[in-house]
Image (cartoon, grey):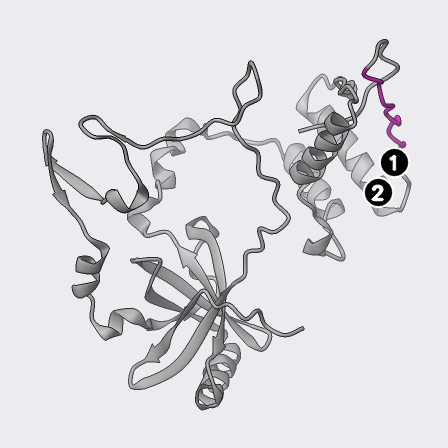
C-alpha cells in the first residue's frame, strides 16, 4: 500500500554533520473513533460555543489572539510568528542528541503520539537506511528534539522494520515521580507459600503467542452498538453482573487462580457466558442487552 500523500511534517534528520531530508506521517489512526456532540437535555438541540468579548460582543476567529496575563488584568499578546523568529534553522530539524540502549526510557514518559519517519527523496534514502541499520546492529534508539505543531518536542527515534518511528516523550518535569506516592504502599513480608503460588500463577498465565492485534477497543465497539440500538428504537437494559466467586483469604484465591490458569493452559474451555437478549422499546422488557463499559 502506498504511503498517504499528506505528510504531517517535513524537515531534516540531523546527526552531527549528517543531514537527511525526511517526512513524517502520523502513526496514530483515529478514523475509527466515534465522536459525540453535546446536546440540550430538554430538546436535543446541539450546543453552540460562542466566543464573546465583554466589551464588543461575539467575535470571529480572525479577531482572536493569544496572550499571557503577566499581572492582574494585564496581558501581553504572544504571536506564534514572533515565537518562530526565536528559532534557528536547526530547530526545524529532528536533531539527534545521542544514542541510548533500547530500554533506557521508561514507558511512562511516552506521550502517545507517534510518527513514521521516511526519507524525503532519493538523496536521503542511503543515509537514512545506513542510520537505521546501524541502530539495529547496535541495539540502540536515539533521543532527539524537534519543533512540531508550533512547539519544541522531545522524541525517541527507534528502528521499526524498514522505517524509523518517532515517538513523542513527556519532559521529566511534566511527569509526577513515583517516589511521591511510594509512602502509600505498605512494606509487607510474604509467606513462602504465597510467593511460590504467585510464581506458579505467573508462569501458568504467560502468553505463549502474544499478538497485540487481537486486542480491540471495546469502548468504540459497544458505543457503536449502543448507537445502533438507539437509532432502531430499542431499549438498552442493564446487563446482569457475573457472580464473583467468594474467596475467604488470599491463599484460597491464589490456589483457585492457579487451578484456573493451568486449566486454560491445558486447553480446557471456559464456561460460556449467557447470551443477552434485546428488549423492545414498546413495552415489556424481555431481557438484557449486554452493553458493558
* Residue at the image point whose x is 81% and y is 35% from the top: 260
- Mark 2 burial class by Cα count in 10 Å: few <14, some 14-19, many 20+: some
What count of labels does the image hold?
Answer: 2
SS for callout 1: loop
Residue 275: say if magenta: yes
> Which quadrant of the figure has residue 218?
top right
Give the vertical position of 137 relative to 74 (above or below). Answer: below
The residue segment tinted magenta is 271-281
Give the vertical position of 148 relative to 42 (above or below). Answer: below
Indicate the position of residue 208 as horizontal and vertical percent values.
76, 56
Indicate the position of residue 11 as horizontal and vertical percent values.
37, 74
> Which quadrant of the figure has residue 49?
top left
Residue 276 versus residue 15: which sits nearer the camera? 276
Closer to viewer: mark 2 or mark 1: 1
Marks 2 and 1 in Cβ contact (< 8 Å) = yes
Q: Which residue is mark 1?
A: 270
**Extreme-top residue of the structure:** 284
N-terminal of the two: label 2 or label 1? Answer: 2
Per the rendering, the mark at residue 51 is none
Q: Which residue is mark 2?
A: 264
* Residue at the image point whose x is 84% and y is 9% from the top: 283
Indicate the position of residue 17 as horizontal and vertical percent values.
29, 86
Indicate the position of residue 209 as horizontal and vertical percent values.
76, 57
Give the vertical position of 54 relative to 171 (above or below). Answer: above
- Mark 1 burial class by Cα count in 10 Å: few <14, some 14-19, many 20+: few
**Residue 196 seen by the camera:** no
Question: Could you tell whether 73 is left or right of 83 in the image?
Answer: left
* Residue at the image point whose x is 52% and y is 82% from the top: 133
Amino acid at each position: 500500500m502506498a504511503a498517504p500523500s499528506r505528510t504531517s511534517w517535513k524537515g531534516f534528520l540531523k546527526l552531527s554533520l549528517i543531514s537527511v531530508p525526511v517526512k513524517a506521517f502520523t502513526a496514530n489512526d483515529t478514523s475509527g473513533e466515534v465522536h459525540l456532540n453535546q446536546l440540550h437535555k430538554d430538546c436535543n438541540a446541539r450546543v453552540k460555543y460562542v466566543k464573546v468579548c465583554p466589551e464588543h460582543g461575539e467575535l470571529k476567529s480572525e479577531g482572536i489572539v493569544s496572550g499571557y496575563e503577566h499581572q492582574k488584568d494585564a496581558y501581553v499578546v504572544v504571536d506564534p510568528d514572533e515565537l518562530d523568529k526565536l528559532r534557528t534553522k536547526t530547530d526545524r530539524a529532528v536533531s539527534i542528541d545521542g544514542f541510548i540502549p533500547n530500554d533506557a526510557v521508561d514507558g511512562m514518559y511516552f506521550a502517545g503520539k507517534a510518527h513514521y519517519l521516511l526519507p524525503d527523496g532519493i538523496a536521503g534514502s542511503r543515509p537514512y537506511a545506513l542510520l537505521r541499520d546501524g541502530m539495529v546492529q547496535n541495539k540502540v534508539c536515539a533521543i532527539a528534539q524537534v519543533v512540531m505543531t508550533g512547539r519544541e518536542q522531545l522524541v525517541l527515534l527507534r528502528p521499526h522494520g524498514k522505517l524509523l518511528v518517532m515517538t513523542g516523550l513527556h519532559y521529566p518535569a511534566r511527569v509526577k515521580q513515583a517516589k511521591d506516592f511510594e509512602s502509600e504502599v505498605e512494606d509487607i513480608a510474604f509467606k513462602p507459600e504465597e510467593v511460590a503460588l504467585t510464581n506458579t500463577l505467573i508462569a501458568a498465565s504467560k502468553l505463549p503467542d502474544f499478538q497485540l492485534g487481537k486486542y480491540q477497543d471495546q469502548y468504540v465497539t459497544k458505543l457503536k452498538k449502543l448507537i445502533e440500538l438507539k437509532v432502531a428504537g430499542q431499549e438498552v437494559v442493564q446487563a446482569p453482573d457475573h457472580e464473583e466467586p467468594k474467596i475467604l483469604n488470599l491463599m484460597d484465591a491464589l490456589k483457585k487462580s492457579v487451578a484456573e490458569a493451568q486449566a486454560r493452559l491445558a486447553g480446557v474451555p471456559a464456561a460460556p457466558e449467557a447470551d443477552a437478549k434485546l428488549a423492545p422499546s414498546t413495552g415489556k422488557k424481555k431481557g438484557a442487552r449486554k452493553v458493558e463499559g
